[in-house]
Amino acid sequence: MVDAQRATRMADRIKVIVAQALERRIKDPRLGFVTVTDARVTNDLQHATVYYTVYGTAEEKADSARALESAKGILRSEVGKNITARLTPTLEFVADEIPEAASHLEDVLRRAKEKDAQVAAAAAGAQYASGENPYRTSEAEEDSAADSEADDDALGASDVDVPESADADAQGTAGESER
C-alpha cells in the first residue's frame, strides 16, 4: 500500500496524460467533444478510474464511450510511458454525472427563485383579512375578563374547602419538623 498523497498525485498525472493522448494521439471519429474531469487511483496503484464528460446528444455520448473503450490499450500504454511506477494501472472510463446533476440543481433553484418572486409580488399588494390585529378584542370580552379576575380575588382562604385528610397531613408534617 502506498500513501494517499502519492495516489492522488498519480491520479492527477493520469488525468493530464489521458487528456493529452485523447487530443493528440487518438484519431477515432466516434470520439466527440470529450473532457476528462477527474481521475482516481486506488491506494495500491493498480486501478485507475477516469471520469469524463461528452458534449452532445445521448447517441454521441454512447459513441464516445465505445471509442474510449476501444482506445483503452493505447491510453494505458501512454500512461505507462509517462509515469514512474513499477506497474501500469488498469484504466476504467466512467461518464461523469456531476455536470448533469449540477445543471438539474441549477434549474430547480431557478424555478424556486421564480416562485419566490411570484409570492413576493402577490404579498406586496395583499392586505390583512381581518385588519392589523387578527385576534378578537371587544369591550364585552374585556369586561367579562375583568369580572372573572375580581371573582378570583374575592375568594379567600376561608372559602376554600380543604379535606380533613389534607389538614391531618399538614399537621403531621409540621409536627415532624418540630422534633
Image (spheres, rainbow, N blue to C red):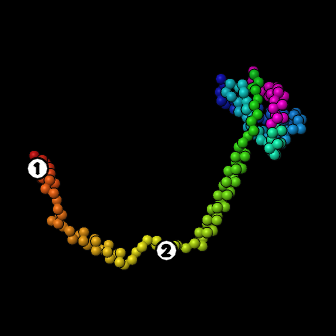
Task: Tell me if residue 73 is in the magenta stretch.
Answer: yes
Residue 38 x/y as whole percent? 73, 37
Residue 28 x/y as whole percent? 88, 35
Region in magenta: 65-86
Asked if residue 11 shows in the view, the reply is no
The crowding category of the residue bearing disc 2, from other C-alpha atoms within 10 Å (few below 14, some 14 to 19, many at least 20), is: few
Q: CA distance from mark 1 to mark 2?
A: 61 Å
Is residue 133 found left or right of 123 in the rendered image? Answer: left
Instruction: Tell me the residue that label 1 is attached to.
Output: 175
Which amino acid type is shown beneath numbered disc 2? Ser
The label shown at residue 130 is 2
Dividing the picture into quadrants, the one containing residue 120 is bottom right
Name the residue: 72% across, 42% down: 97
The crowding category of the residue bearing disc 1, from other C-alpha atoms within 10 Å (few below 14, some 14 to 19, many at least 20), is: few
Q: Look at discs 1 and 2 and give the one toward the viewer.
A: 2
| Circle 2: element type | loop
Give the camera-side residue of 2 and 133. 133
Q: Is residue 143 above or below residue 176?
A: below
Give the camera-side residue of 174 and 5. 174
Q: Earlier in the sequence, mark 1 or mark 2?
A: 2
Name the residue: 66% across, 55% down: 109
Asked if residue 179 shows in the view, the reply is yes
Dividing the picture into quadrants, the one containing residue 145 is bottom left
